[in-house]
Image (cartoon, rainbow, N blue to C red):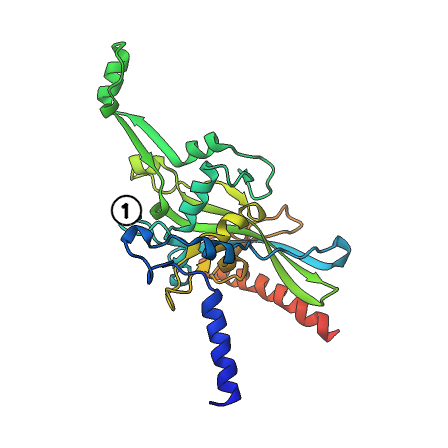
Amino acid sequence: MTIKNVVLLCAFSLLFGLSASAQVNILNAKAPDEIGVKTEAQMEYDNDGPLPYGYVDDRDVLWSKTTWEIIDLNERMNFPLYYPIDTNNIGQDRRSLYDVLVKNIKAGNITEVYADSYFTQKRDLTDIQASLVYSDTTDMGISQLNAGEEVDPQYVRSFTLDAGDIEEWRIRGYWYVDKRQGELKYRLLGICPVANEARSKAFPDDMDSKVELFWVFYPDAREVLHKAYAFNQGNSSQPLSFDHLLNSRRFSAVIYKEDNEYGDREVDHYIQDNALMQLLESERIKDKIRNVEMDLWAN
């Protein structure tokens, strides 16, 4: 065996040894309920956190641009952010990004939740529930109410948004040139699920009410997303944490807005009724950002 092969073998062994597995303890379990349960030694070994962001002084930011992007969940590349949508017959370690965020918001692990991408209006759990759940009383229930009677629970319909209802994610990010390191970098600032309102499940004819459910200030969610894993189609024993997937931009997205002198006007506000031209405008903005780093070295 050549030295090159030995080095490659060691590198692969280290890679597979350090990675988090979606099927923890599956080879050593003596009963099904032991699958996914780490030993004390494993938990001590895996006691890590998300890769910390390095400190960047404002004086070191030579250039910056804020962008808003849409991650369309109909695109195959974005499926790891969407599935699984049915969790009744799947392991506890497999959850969609939406389920992970909502569960941890309800549990109080994520507190920086807002109504808008500028993080100006904070939302609490009650506000979130109002966006995710719609209750409706049937005609029989209304009749009971008008008669002064207590409404029978069977006459109250409740509709809840779930992972399968999410159509896209919207993200806000910050591109900047770090003059100390001389390179273009990206920092994810916020993430937001988008779906039709819960009311549309009660009234299917009203399906054009797509709304931003809530915005999460991303740095506050990193600890949670570091412990939650997306499925890796290429190798199921090497899942990617949602934090890694999002920070490394392993998704397909289209820019729909950039910070500009027109009050951060969206692309479809100045290019209307022409999807192709809107897409080309998004690509133009991407090229403009990429060219900044090239121009940095060319000048």
What residue occupies the far top of the structure in this picture?
Answer: 148
Q: Residue at x 34, y 48 (%)?
A: 164
Up/down of 110 relative to 156, above or below: below
Q: Is residue 254 shown above or below 126? A: below
Quadrant placement of the C terminus: bottom right
Most foreground residue, 111 or 11: 11
Q: Residue at x 63, y 45 (%)?
A: 263
The kind of secondary structure element at disc 1 is: loop
Measuring from the top left, give residue 91's x and y in whole percent: 32, 52
Q: Amino acid at mark 1?
A: Asn
Question: Would you call the spot at circle 1 few (<14 residues within 10 Å), some (14-19), or many (20 or more)?
Answer: few
Which residue position holds label 1? 88
Picture quadrant where residue 238 is located: bottom left
Residue 211: tell me if it is visible: no
Q: Position of residue 199 (x, y in %)?
A: 35, 34
Q: Is residue 135 left or right of residue 173?
A: left
Which residue does the image show at 36% across and 46% down from the upper left? 163
Q: Residue at x 30, y 31 (%)?
A: 158
Query: In the displayed structure, does residue 168 sit left or right of residue 200?
Result: right
